[in-house]
Amino acid sequence: METTIPTYIRIMQSIRQEIVSGVLVPNQKMDSIKELSKKYVANPNTVQRALANLEEEGLVRSNRTAGKYVTDNELLIKSIRCKEARKVTEEFITNLERLGIHPDELVRLFSEPELSKAMGTA
């Protein structure tokens, strides 16, 4: 069964990723709702909903007259980055276990000359 992710959540995920990865930096003025609507090919109300949720999370702050800005709370950004890194690492380990590979074996696997050659990393 295929589940579709609502557009506003996809927009939130994309903007969150840009903030956490440093594409959007603390205190940076964000594009207008109109510009973001074009970028994400979405209704302005949908973009507004995504930004409102990011504001609730603390990643975006609003200045009534000057638009929206990336938070200046670098500790929050680092915290979210660490949380995302843990999530990705846990998924990676789960996938390894499905393949019957224990994480401790990784160093050995990548250091075997034949395997490195086959993978194009030699």
Image: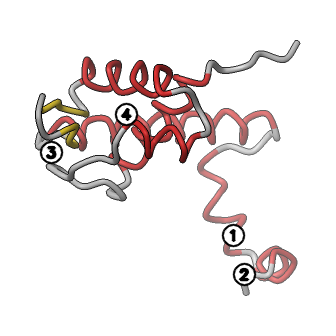
Q: Amino acid at mark 2?
A: Thr
Residue that numbered label 3 is attached to: 74
- Against 108, residue 111 (above or below) is below
Q: Residue furthest top?
A: 1
Report if the CB atoms under discs 4 and 2 are less than 8 Å apart. Answer: no
Front residue of 78 and 51 = 51
Q: Amino acid at mark 4?
A: Lys
- Report the Cα–Cα distance between label 2 and label 3: 36 Å
Circle number at residue 83: 4
Residue positioned 17% across, 30% down in the render: 62
- Label 4, secondary structure: give it: helix
For the residues carrying marks 3 and 4, which lies nearer the camera in this image? 3
Q: Taking 25 as reference, is 14 left or right?
A: right
Display coloring: secondary structure
Q: Amino acid at mark 3?
A: Glu
For the residues carrying marks 4 and 2, which lies nearer the camera in this image? 4
Residue 17 rendering spot, x and y as whole percentages: 44, 44
Residue that numbered label 1 is attached to: 110
